[in-house]
Image: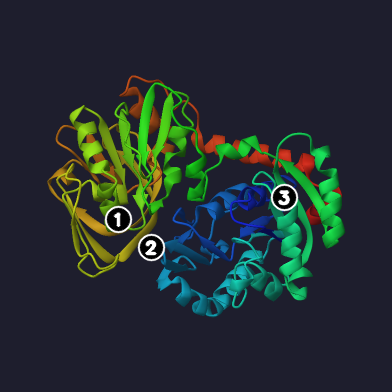
Amino acid sequence: MTKTIMLQGTGSDVGKTVLVAGLCRIAANRGLKVAPFKPQNMSNNAAVSDDGGEIGRAQWLQSMAARIPSSVHMNPVLLKPQSETGSQIIVQGKVAGQARGRDYQALKPKLMGAVMDSFEIVRSGVDLVVVEGAGSPAEINLRAGDIANMGFATRANVPVVLVGDIDRGGVIASLVGTHTILSGEDRAMISGYIINKFRGDVSLFDDGIAAVNGFTGWSCFGVVPWLKSAARLPAEDSVVLEKLARGTGRALKVAVPVLSRIANFDDLDPLAAEPEVDLVFVRAGERIPADAGLVVIPGSKATIADLADFRAQGWDHDLQAHVRRGGRVIGICGGFQMLGARVTDPHGIEGNISEIDGLGLLAVETEMAAEKTVRNSSARSAIYDVTLEGYEIHLGRTTGADCARPAVIIDGRADGAVSANGMVSGTYLHGLFASDAYRAALLKSFGIEGGGENYRLSVDRAIDDVAAELEAVLEPRWLDSLMS
């Protein structure tokens, strides 16, 4: 009989993703066949699963932690926000349509069938499934038709562990408040709780645990300290961009404009890990630093809208000045599309704007098309002649004179473009900087040594470190009963 546990949070960004990855690695290290599952995810950080569809990158990371191939069934419903009120809906890896928030609430009950079908596929043949919730079960205004938290837990009869983030404050009220407002049926699904992101002497929270236990009757399954190793893992939620340190004074400053619909920003993580790279995320209202050597324009879920916002921020003038000073520019996916002369959307795929001028740094044009490219890819850098492994998730076809100088060769075909002077380039390939050889060659062109550490191996080691830290602090009897 497959065991299942579900981690739900008292709110968003409480650390569920990392805890699930850690539990998956603990189970795998103990010789269990384990799989992650998230019924519904909302993120523009998507991955291409091993079976060829889109899933949240968190579930891709968790499958890596579990040491099993990733599958679309690990994240059957993925919402990719395109505007403040609407999202593209991915069901079992494929685009199923778009919906505004209120319309999606009406659609959710129809998606439960796909969620349950995927859940049965994931748990078939494994010893343990570790499920991740989304947001919080305390959002009782969204409980009707819920597929992400208690709606799934009650339907699948999966016990829940509630995760509270003590770092943000109010963790006792969050846990007790959740207990208070849940229905009796939902409350009965919760077997205990975990306190996450604790700093300092854990014994100082003994009275806090006693208080929570007294109000709720729930057991505490552990107080988890701030996991330093988690910082070496790819982040899923763009909220993390607001917390990153800036201006460290390292040898090469790389500036990244934070687009309003930034996507797959974990493309930048390998650069952030380089000792001589100062990765600066430029927020709305800020200027692109004049001393940046490289500007990377990342992926976008809404190229046209983000291009308009790019201009509204004045970043187009900053970028032109950067290029005049001899600075370099790399665009990835939507960022590549923005670098061209024009982006057209004759079919209204992204909205009501059918055409917009690009930034004009590459002699290319992009036309949005209904067919979406989703695939894992093997490639070579045409600039540095090194091997690349990555993935493509994009709408649109880009053509033009600068495409005669491709940035990469993907599975034997030319992709991307390079300007005549070689200072501006773009590609549809995500995962560019994760290639150690490419990263080393890029940094060498700036006179910097780097790329020596195997990035993918460093992520795997970080997962092992997280697992070891969790084993040391989680309640042993609870953990052993889960893993037995």
Q: Are marks 1 and 3 in contact (CB under 8 Å)?
A: no
Residue 229 quadrant: top right
- Residue 475 in view of the camera: no
SS for callout 3: helix
Q: Which residue is mark 2?
A: 83
Task: Look at mark 3 in the image and give the residue it sits on.
Answer: 27
Which mark sits nearer the N-terminus, 1 or 2? 2
State the quadrant of the C terminus.
bottom right
Give whichever of discs 1 and 3 has the lower sequence position: 3
* Residue receiving disc 1: 303
Q: Position of residue 94 (x, y in %)?
A: 43, 67
Residue at 51% from the left image edge and 50% from the top image edge: 236
Mark nearer the viewer, 1 or 3: 1
- Kindly identify the amino acid type of the residue bearing the numbered disc 3: Ala
Q: Measured from the top left, where is residue 73 in percent x and y?
A: 55, 65
Secondary structure found at label 1: helix
